[in-house]
Image: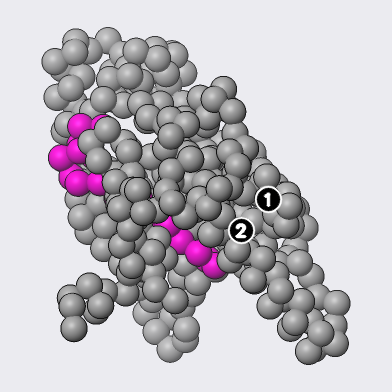
């Protein structure tokens, strides 16, 4: 027996995965792809055609099968039932390109006839407000599992999966680096909901009061999950590059939480970015984010040029 036979995943090269497009036509134009790309990320037409178009085809098949199962269950129970969204989780490190992947999937999946309504939320909105993080001494652990209002996130996903209408989620501002008080977005019975975040695949440890009962995880609500990966040195490079780009753009806004960094020299800014990466993001990646990779249904591994070089799909 080969070692690969023991793996829960089937591995594809970029070329092997691209062939699974199976002639599916490209539905996005070049200008649309430009709008979907995150700051400092790279996204080409070739990348969408080779990686994301086959993935959207696979997900459309999964959704169709789930919809048929839902209909069969309704017939069995003799009830009408409420439409339940297919939920996709997207996880991975800071600066790996989760937002770009999530937006591309949203755009592609919305073009399939059985999933016309696709919505996307990020778990940033479920971060605890800065005032709470400061009071609890957690500002330097922002993005770590303990910095999220997990109960609120679980309540949100419970309502979405129950098929409720107009489920509200809080909104986060990357300009002010905080949750916007009183502002929400509404998720209204989508065909697909994409949930993007650092720790969405993490298994939560029960508190002492929860020790005698089952504790749900965020990933319990997912029908499919994607983890985006790259090696640590590459991620560090991307993070510093993004920081330097932000220093020339968003950080120049006086309302920006990071406005003070816009006045640093290149050398100073690079040192600050690397300090933040090594002190916060790298420990979080090693301790909390990367250990969840093995829980994903699909792992997309990037090379230094942001291109997906390998795809691992969990065996069914």
Where is residue 155 shown, x and y percent of the image?
60, 64
Q: Quadrant of the N terminus?
A: bottom left
Which residue is nearer to you in this view: 229 or 15? 15
- 176 on left or right of 265: right
Q: Which residue is mark 1?
A: 112
Give the vertical position of 2 relative to 34 (above or below): below
What residue lies at 64% left-to-right and 56% top-to-bottom? Answer: 192
Q: Which residue is mark 2?
A: 60
One can see residue 51 in this view: yes
Tags 1 and 2 touching, CB below 8 Å: yes
Distance from the alpha carbon under mark 1 to that under mark 2: 7 Å
Give the vertical position of 261 relative to 10 (above or below): above
Mark 1, secondary structure of its residue? loop
Label 2, residues with CA under 10 Å away: few <14, some 14-19, many ≥20: many
Where is residue 86 shown, x and y percent of the image?
62, 63
Q: Is residue 237 magenta?
A: yes
Q: Is residue 211 magenta?
A: no
Where is residue 78 shown, x and y percent of the image?
85, 87
Q: Which residues are magenta?
A: 222-239
């Amino acid at each position: 027996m080969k070692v690969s036979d023991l793996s829960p995943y089937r591995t594809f090269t970029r070329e092997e995965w691209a062939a699974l497009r199976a002639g599916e036509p490209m539905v996005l134009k070049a200008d649309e792809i430009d709008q979907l790309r995150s700051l400092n990320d790279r996204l080409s037409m070739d990348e969408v055609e080779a990686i994301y178009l086959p993935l959207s085809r696979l997900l459309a098949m999964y959704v169709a099968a789930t919809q048929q199962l839902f209909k069969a269950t309704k017939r069995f129970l003799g009830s009408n039932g409420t439409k339940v969204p297919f939920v996709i989780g997207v996880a991975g490190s800071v600066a790996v390109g989760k937002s770009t992947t999530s937006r591309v999937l949203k755009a592609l999946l919305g073009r399939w006839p059985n999933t016309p309504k696709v919505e996307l939320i990020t778990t940033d909105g479920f971060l605890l407000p800065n005032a709470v993080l400061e009071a609890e001494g957690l500002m330097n652990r922002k993005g770590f599992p303990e910095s999220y209002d997990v109960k609120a996130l679980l309540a949100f996903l419970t309502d979405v999966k129950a098929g409720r209408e107009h489920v509200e989620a809080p909104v986060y501002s990357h300009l002010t680096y905080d949750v916007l008080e009183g502002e929400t977005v509404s998720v209204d019975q989508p065909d697909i909901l994409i949930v993007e975040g650092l720790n969405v695949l993490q298994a939560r440890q029960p508190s002492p009061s929860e020790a005698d009962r089952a504790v749900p995880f965020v990933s319990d609500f997912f029908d499919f999950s994607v983890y985006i990966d790259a090696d640590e040195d590459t991620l560090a490079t991307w993070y510093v590059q993004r920081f330097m780009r932000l220093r020339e753009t968003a950080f120049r806004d006086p309302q920006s939480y990071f406005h003070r960094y816009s006045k640093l020299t290149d050398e100073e800014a690079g040192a600050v970015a690397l300090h933040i990466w090594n002190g916060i993001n790298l420990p979080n990646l090693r301790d909390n984010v990367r250990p969840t990779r093995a829980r994903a249904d699909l792992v997309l591994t990037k090379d230094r040029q942001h291109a997906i070089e390998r795809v691992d799909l969990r065996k069914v």
